[in-house]
Amino acid sequence: MNMGERIKQLRIANGLTQEELGKYIGVQKSAIRKYEKGEVQNIKRNSIQILSNLFGVSPSYLMCIEDEETKTNNFASTIPLLSNYTDSLTESIDNFFIKDININDNLPEASFALQINNNSMLPLLGIGDIAIITETFSFESGQTCLISKDNILMIRKIIKTDDEYSLEALNPYYPIEKTKNLKIYGKVLSAENKSAFK
């Protein structure tokens, strides 16, 4: 296995598209494609470090110098916990900031935590639980996202068809909604139980 193949393997294992990974390290999707095909011989040291932190592996493992994956868990992200969200993260922090919380993960830029106030996404998220969300992402059908429909904020799994979106809650008591108009604010990265941050 070469470094390009390892980057591809780790990217897929972490559920990232080439475009999302590119945004994370500050390069175009085409650059990631070249990395993965082995067309770039000397990837910048800074990019290697960012990729290592993102995937939680050592630079040596990423560069195929060693074969055993040693997870590095010595990183954490501090992100704002919000009680609500409006049109931008900056505005939401100004109006709905609760506190900063530490997440034992390396998150993309423009990530935040949102306190949930309904049970539409049970069993993933219940009232008081925390959704970890990033504004840094490229939308693909099937993702679970923070959205606004008819000025109502919600988290839903979004299925995109030719001319409309299907909005699916996990809780079966909430019906599937269909719409042609919605705002997608961010992608849900993970869910955390409310007790984790007491």
Image (cartoon, rainbow, N blue to C red):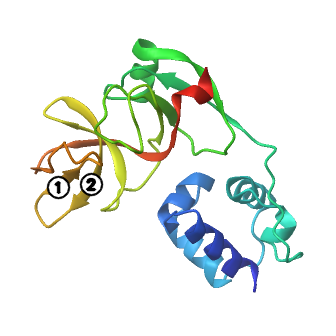
Crowd band around label 2 with a 10 angstrom C-alpha radius: few (<14), some (14–19), many (20+): many
- Residue 40 shows in this picture: no
Can you give x and y, in whole percent of width and height, for residue 90 in the image? 45, 24
Can you give x and y, in whole percent of width and height, for residue 187 in the image? 41, 47
Q: Residue at x 61, y 25 (%)?
A: 197
Say how many tags the image has: 2
Q: Is residue 30 left or right of residue 39?
A: left
Q: Quadrant of the C terminus?
A: top right
Q: Is residue 73 above or below residue 196?
A: below
Please give the residue where the numbered disc 1 appears in the rendered image: 165
Cα separation, mark 2 vs mark 1, equals 6 Å
Q: Residue at x 40, y 56 (%)?
A: 138
Q: Quadrant of the N terminus?
A: bottom right
Please give the residue where the numbered disc 2 appears in the rendered image: 158
- Residue 54 shows in this picture: yes
**Which label belongs to residue 103?**
none
